[in-house]
Image (spheres, rainbow, N blue to C red):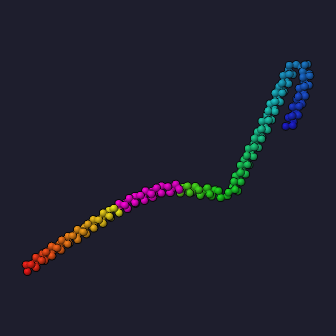
Amino acid sequence: MEEGQQQHIRQIKNSRLMEEDGEEESPRSALSSFQAREEEIERKKMEVKEKVFAQLCRVEEEAKHLAMIRGELEAMVDPTRNEAAALRKKIDVVNRALKPLGQSCLRKEKEYKEALEAFNEKNKEKSQLVAKLMELVSESERLRMRKLEELNKSIDFFR
């Protein structure tokens, strides 16, 4: 960079000398002087581009280096983080599998309760019918016994 500045200073000095001599110079020398300045500007522009490109490459390398260091730091901070993340994923998978099973269980519990309630109602109805049947059978036996006693009395009466 210092070399470029020194060349620029020399050019300025040369241009001043040329200006002093410029009154005597022809338009051709003015044109060549202008072209020389344009070339110098282009050369400096290229130097600046090269420097910017070099710095950009250096910055990219530093960014990669920093990213690598950041990764190493994160790995050092929590070495079990990957294991924990894997376990969390497995837990999520199991939770997704449990959800439909839980719904199925609730549905079947509801069906079971409904079936149990229907069973209990039918069992109660059966008990009532058995009780009524027992009552009818006892009533029938009592009536038959009475009839038998009456027949027995009537047979004894004829005897």
Q: Is residue 105 above or below residue 158?
A: above
Q: On the rendered structure, is 101 left or right of 62?
A: left
Query: Residue at horizontal 69%, vertical 54%?
Result: 74
Where is residue 156 shown, x and y percent of the image? 10, 79
Residue 105 appears in which quarter of the rendering?
bottom left
**Residue 156 located left or right of residue 88:** left
- Residue placed most toward the observer, 144 or 157: 157
The part of the chain drawn in magenta is 95-119
- Looking at the picture, how far across and down is residue 119, in whole percent? 35, 62
* Quadrant of the rendering where the N terminus is positioned: top right
In percent of width and height, residue 122 lies at 32, 62
The image shows residue 56, relative to residue 98, as above or below, that is: above
Residue at position x 91%, y 19% in the image: 24
Q: Is residue 2 above or below residue 124?
A: above
Q: Residue furthest bottom?
A: 159
The image quadrant where one finds the C terminus is bottom left
Above-or-below relation of 16 to 74: above
User: Relative to the observer, which residue lies in front, 158 or 85?
Assistant: 158
